[in-house]
């Protein structure tokens, strides 16, 4: 099936985020989700939807720069062209524009959505290598708060059914040992503990020391302890610590993944379309990681349900994601007061139900999607 693109539109949208318990990490505080929503329409009038979950500190993009790049730079190269699949369009975008992965991903996701809708199929049915999971457990982030607030948030999320808690760590002035000890004493052995330093530890020695201090609290994963541009340092930390390493900031692209595999720097790969520059890349990277003997888990830039739908599709459909062992960062229901999609993605028992229906199974809710 060929696709002739008629139009590509992008809108900036503000999604109110809870201020009580907002995610605070070594990179700062996630106070607002100012994103871009993308609609791609083909010559037959079929549509697909995507979301650019921009954050300057993360990818160097804002909603405004993504919108400009999409409408003024990428759209003129794509509109009027015919493609046999989304990968062809993404290759054109990658060849024309360095970086700007979240902008390119929004278009790529929208194209996958469009193609599947035209076929009357789900994207999952196009990519699955196993019986798709109907429900995915969520891993929920707890910001770098003092012990009392950390315990309060852990209790709240645990009461909502969450079994895997991800503690942001590495912010100077706060005692991570005291924080995790307080939660373990309050909730007992049931919650699975993971930590995410967002690259806060400047040396391998500092990272190893931080991990060793937290070992008594039974860590299941250590996420990105070292700076994003230090793959060799991450590999050293992996060799020196007994806890599996989840690589995030250090692997955005397929090229980064090859470097990380070559240096055996990780156990689990954090994947999501925005960071990877497209659903097409996420799919290929998950398969490549699995072929190298690694596994995957979904990461997050606090996507709304619109962005989460594509992430859930990957985790549900691919055997590279052992969701029974490693939960996924699918937490929109806990941080947004209302869903950005119709229908909303259903939260149940500490996780999310995979949307059904054609495409990624959701469309933007009309109300919030306005200029």
Image (cartoon, helix red, strand yellow):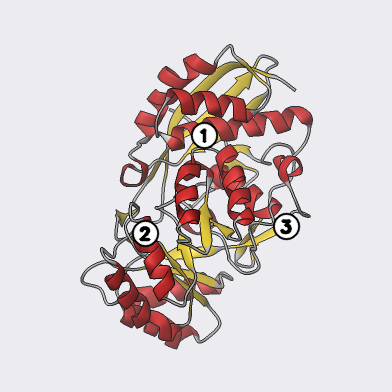
Instruction: Please report whichever mark, 1 or 3, sits nearer to the chain's N-terminal start.
Output: 1
Cα separation, mark 2 vs mark 3, equals 35 Å
Q: Position of residue 243 (x, y in %)?
A: 47, 75
Residue furthest top as drawn? 80
Foreground mark, 2 or 3, reads 2
Location of the N terminus by quadrant is top right
Instruction: Please report whichever mark, 2 or 1, sits nearer to the chain's N-terminal start.
Output: 1
Residue at horizontal 40%, vertical 77%? Answer: 151
Residue furthest front as drawn? 262
Mark 3 sits on what residue? 133
Location of the C terminus by quadrant is top left
Cα separation, mark 1 vs mark 3, equals 24 Å
Query: Is disc 3 surrounded by few (<14), some (14 to 19) or many (20+) residues within 10 Å?
Result: some
Residue 366 visible from this viewpoint = no
Q: Which mark is residue 254?
A: none
Residue 61, compared with residue 216, is above or below; it is above
Instruction: Please report whichever mark, 2 or 3, sits nearer to the chain's N-terminal start.
Output: 3
Foreground mark, 2 or 1, reads 2
Residue at horizontal 68%, vertical 23%? Answer: 84
- Position of 100 compared to 106: left or right? left
Residue 259 visible from this viewpoint = yes
Q: Which mark is residue 232?
A: 2
Residue at horizontal 33%, vertical 56%? Answer: 230
Query: Disc 1 on helix, strand or loop?
Result: helix
Residue 90, compared with residue 276, is above or below; it is above
Q: Position of residue 215 (x, y in %)?
A: 41, 82
Q: Nearer the viewer, residue 297 or 67?
A: 297
Query: Disc 3 on helix, strand or loop?
Result: loop
Query: Is disc 2 surrounded by few (<14), some (14 to 19) or many (20+) residues within 10 Å?
Result: some
- Position of 98 compared to 90: left or right? left
Mark 1 sits on what residue? 106
């Amino acid at each position: 099936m060929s696709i002739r693109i008629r139009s590509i539109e992008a809108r900036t949208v503000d999604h109110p985020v809870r201020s009580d318990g907002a995610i605070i990490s070594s990179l700062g505080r996630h106070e607002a989700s100012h994103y871009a929503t993308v609609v791609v329409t083909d010559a037959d009038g079929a549509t697909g939807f995507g979301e650019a979950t921009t954050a300057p500190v993360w990818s160097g993009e804002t909603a405004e720069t993504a919108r400009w790049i999409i409408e003024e730079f990428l759209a003129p190269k794509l509109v009027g062209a015919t493609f046999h699949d989304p990968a062809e369009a993404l290759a054109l975008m990658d060849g024309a524009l360095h970086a700007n992965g979240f902008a390119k991903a929004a278009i790529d996701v929208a194209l996958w959505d469009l193609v599947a809708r035209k076929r009357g199929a789900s994207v999952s049915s196009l990519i699955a290598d196993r019986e798709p999971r109907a429900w995915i457990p969520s891993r929920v982030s707890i910001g770098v708060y003092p012990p009392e607030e950390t315990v309060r948030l852990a209790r709240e999320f645990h009461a909502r059914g969450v079994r895997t808690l991800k503690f942001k760590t590495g912010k100077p002035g706060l005692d991570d040992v005291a924080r995790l000890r307080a939660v373990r004493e309050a909730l007992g052995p049931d919650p699975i503990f993971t930590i995410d330093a967002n690259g806060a530890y400047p040396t391998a020695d500092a990272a190893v020391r931080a991990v060793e201090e937290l070992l008594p609290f039974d860590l299941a994963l250590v996420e990105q302890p070292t700076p994003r541009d230090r793959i060799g340092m991450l590999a050293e930390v992996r060799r020196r610590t007994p806890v599996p390493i989840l690589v995030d900031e250090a692997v955005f692209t397929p090229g980064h993944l090859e470097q990380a595999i070559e240096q055996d720097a990780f156990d689990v790969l954090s994947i999501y379309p925005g960071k990877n520059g497209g659903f097409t890349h996420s799919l290929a990277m998950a398969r490549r990681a699995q072929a190298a003997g690694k596994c995957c888990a979904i990461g997050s830039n606090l996507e709304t349900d619109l962005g989460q739908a594509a992430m859930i599709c990957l985790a549900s459909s691919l055997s590279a994601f052992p969701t029974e062992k490693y939960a996924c960062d699918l937490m929109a229901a806990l941080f947004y007061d209302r869903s950005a999609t119709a229908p909303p993605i259903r939260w149940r028992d500490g996780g999310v139900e995979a949307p059904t229906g054609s495409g990624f199974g959701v469309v933007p809710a009309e109300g919030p999607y306005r200029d």
